[in-house]
Image (cartoon, rainbow, N blue to C red):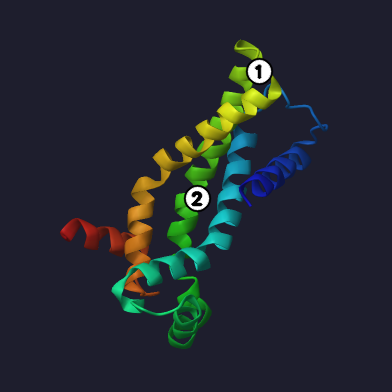
Amino acid sequence: SAIGGMQLGRSMYDFAVGAQPGEYDKNEPMSRFLIGGVVSGISCGTVATPFERLRVLLQTQESSGMSATAALRNTWHSGGIGGIFTGLPITILREIPGCICWIGAYDMSMRYCRDTLKLEHKSAVMVSAVAAPIGWTLSIFPMERIKVQQQAAGSIQENASKTMMRIVRQ
């Protein structure tokens, strides 16, 4: 979802500015990269939210001892589609910088390994595959805390700012 979203965003940029295929292989404009990251974050957040919500439900006492199917059914009956997608905006806000950092760390690491260190492609991929999740992890922690608290509360009425204020008061 992240890579597909990034490619879609980059393709949208290329179409909008009339770029030729492969034109930005060496020097990609920051605006192209950021648009790709935003599209990637939106797609990842939308796909991840129901699974994240279910994970949070299963880890909290609200669904203690329930199976995943029972927790999902219970959430559907109590909140419908909104209950399953509780936390969607904050998940997207988490994923946008996360995707930008993931792809950015991967791209920068690949270029450095290939152009400066002159590593073989396989070795450069391995190094970059480690750098990418590190970049993602470091970028998402503040939003992850807010997202988990919002999803654990189970309220589709509580927005991210209310959740942040609740966390600060605790």
Left or right placement of residue 108 versus residue 24 in this view: left
| On screen, residue 148 above or below 60 | above
Q: Position of residue 99 (x, y in %)?
A: 54, 44
The residue under the point 82% across, 33% down is: 21
User: Of the numbered discs in the image, which one, if any, rests on residue 114?
Assistant: 1
Q: Earlier in the sequence, mark 2 or mark 1?
A: 2
Task: Give amino acid for label 1.
Answer: Arg
Q: What element does badge 2 sit on?
A: helix
Rounded to the nearest angstrom, the CA distance separating label 2 from label 1 is: 28 Å
- The image quadrant that residue 106 belongs to is top right
User: Percent position (x, y) of residue 101?
Assistant: 51, 37
Above or below, 44 against 28 in this view is below
Residue 162 percent coordinates (x, y)? 29, 64
Q: Is residue 104 visible?
A: no
Residue lying furthest bottom: 77
Image quarter where the C terminus lies is bottom left
Image coordinates for residue 169, horizontal then vertical, percent? 16, 60
Which labelled disc corresponds to residue 95?
2
Q: Residue at x 23, y 59 (%)?
A: 167
User: What residue sits 68% from the left and 26% below the top?
Assistant: 122
Q: Nearer the viewer, mark 2 or mark 1?
A: 1
Badge 1 marks a residue whose secondary structure is: helix
The reply to whether dot 2 and dot 1 touch (C-beta < 8 Å) is: no
Q: Looking at the picture, does residue 142 appear above or below residue 67?
A: above
Q: Residues within 10 Å of mark 1 (few under 14, many from 20)?
A: some
The amino acid type, in three-letter code, at marker 2 is Glu
- Residue 45 visible in rendering: yes
